[in-house]
Image: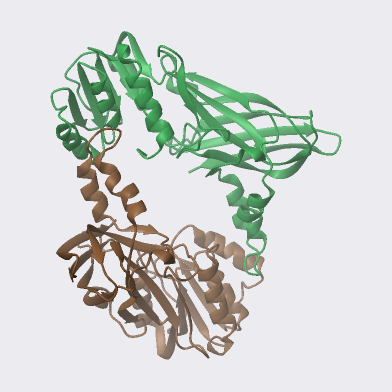
Chain colours: A brown, B green
Amino acid sequence: MLKDVVRTKSYQNVITQNSFLFKDKVALDVGAGTGILSLFCAKAGAKHVYAIECSQMADMAKEIVKANGYSDVITVIKGKVEEIELPVPKVDVIISEWMGYFLLFENMLNTVLYARDKWLADGGVVLPDKASLHLTAIEDAEYKEDKIEFWNNVYGFDMRCIKKQAMMEPLVDTVDANQIVTNCQLLKTMDISKMTPGDASFTVPFKLIAERNDYIHALVAYFNVSFTKCHKMMGFSTGPRSKATHWKQTVLYLEDVITICEGETLTGSMTVTPNKKNPRDIDIKLKYALNGHRCQVSRTQHYKMR
Amino acid sequence: MLKDVVRTKSYQNVITQNSFLFKDKVALDVGAGTGILSLFCAKAGAKHVYAIECSQMADMAKEIVKANGYSDVITVIKGKVEEIELPVPKVDVIISEWMGYFLLFENMLNTVLYARDKWLADGGVVLPDKASLHLTAIEDAEYKEDKIEFWNNVYGFDMRCIKKQAMMEPLVDTVDANQIVTNCQLLKTMDISKMTPGDASFTVPFKLIAERNDYIHALVAYFNVSFTKCHKMMGFSTGPRSKATHWKQTVLYLEDVITICEGETLTGSMTVTPNKKNPRDIDIKLKYALNGHRCQVSRTQHYKMR
């Protein structure tokens, strides 16, 4: 993950270019991993940083903090945010890299919100404080053939029952910007400084307008994050027109191949809910309709991120 | 895995081009997955095929068998080989694709040997019946820098404690044939028709001879499998000079950068043992020495495949 330059460099720039947010402040790093964000905060002048990490990586983080001479400034706490005690009642800044694929898959958002409600001082800052989900539509004949239609005839055998399952699995992959057929639409913005865990379940409408005559094989979701409390607005996008990150994009294949003409609109809605059995999994429902002059289609599809 | 053409096509060729091994025989498919190997066997004229699969995929395999009209020939049994009952006392052929990364990582070999000892008739055949482990040495300055030396300075911080761990993790990746500096040496051959589980623990010597003046950054292990009971010998290699498979190769980075001249030999031994706590994990010990005219080195390194 450290090798995801977009991700790590964005956090580094946010922290080092906005030391006014950290100078002499107490910071909390939720899900610290190697401790890299805590180290950035310490270097930016934080009075103290509490780095919480529940995996074995916490032991490494302790060694790394020591090796870099920050033992007095950074305290690594090994444990779950929901179970540990902090030596201070309040913190000034919470920083975290909590985002999962499709923003919400296997994410740590609820843990960040828990930490915010428990420890963030009045007027304190959460970094990042905005995350948004976006949608577009792509032509993807080649890969759909490879990934989905493959199951029609596997070395001469009919495996279409696997195709049904493959269709329901959102595919995390990088999409070429040239494949984009429509505009990109903002679906949902989340304000991390105010939202509740329930706000991560939602139904939102969309309206995608074709920018050329083409076929649509899949919808593609991606997210942006922003740090609006910086001196100037900072952030990064995981969209297909931005530099690739380890989050890539999330491809939702459609049952139908949609023949769309420039200016026609694909309208519908997306419903996102944590899976009831395993809240770290995500259920996605897509409704879409096109009433174009070469193609009529109206359908509901269900996806499961597992 | 079905999309690994080398793998699936090899099994398909073995089965369809050697129907004499299957015609009117009873076959057992260990770890059947989608049932593809069972379908090949049925098509080759097997009297009956028992396809054992312990995961949810067994339900898919049942559907697939039915969809392809082989319900009378193939019986899918959902369960663990060690726990299920077979409706017949003996089988004529056991077929399995049991190999893991580095041949032995998270493999199903012991399950195949269990099935062989319990159900294989006298004179019966195990497919594949030979598997061999091979070793070579590569120049890999660029990737070693990227994967190992990276930790020396991560955005300005010293994370060398992670480097130590990274060094101990064999890396599964495809190696370019141009990186090969020495000959490729056979380390160990396993006869699946005769071996015992204990034979998967071993210490073997090696002697690699440089074919050019170069640097050695890593040793690379890979495996071949053979089907020697075919009309003519068949099989495939997962080596860096063969078409890539999903097994790729296994790269063991060396502490030292070895400066080797054409004709000089890197000698040593490799010890492979299942991990005591988790026998599906593999512990690898490498001893190596070079007494070259530009470089002397002698070292023991430990690796853990987890």
Image quadrant where residue B114 sits: top left
**Left or right of residue B59, residue B299 in this image:** right
* Residue at 42 percent of width and 64 percent of height: A247
- Residue furthest to the top: B122
- Of residue A53 and residue B66, the one placed in the foreground of this image is B66
Reply above or below: A262 against A276.
below
**Left or right of residue B250, residue B143 in this image:** right
* Residue B155 horizontal/vertical position (percent): 62, 69
- Residue furthest to the right: B293
* Residue at 37 percent of width and 23 percent of height: B13
Image quadrant where residue B109 sits: top left
* Residue at 16 percent of width and 19 percent of height: B87
- Of residue A297 and residue B183, the one placed in the foreground of this image is A297
Residue B108 visible in the current orientation: no
**Left or right of residue B230, residue A168 in this image:** left
* Residue A115 horizontal/vertical position (percent): 38, 77
Image quadrant where residue B251 sits: top right
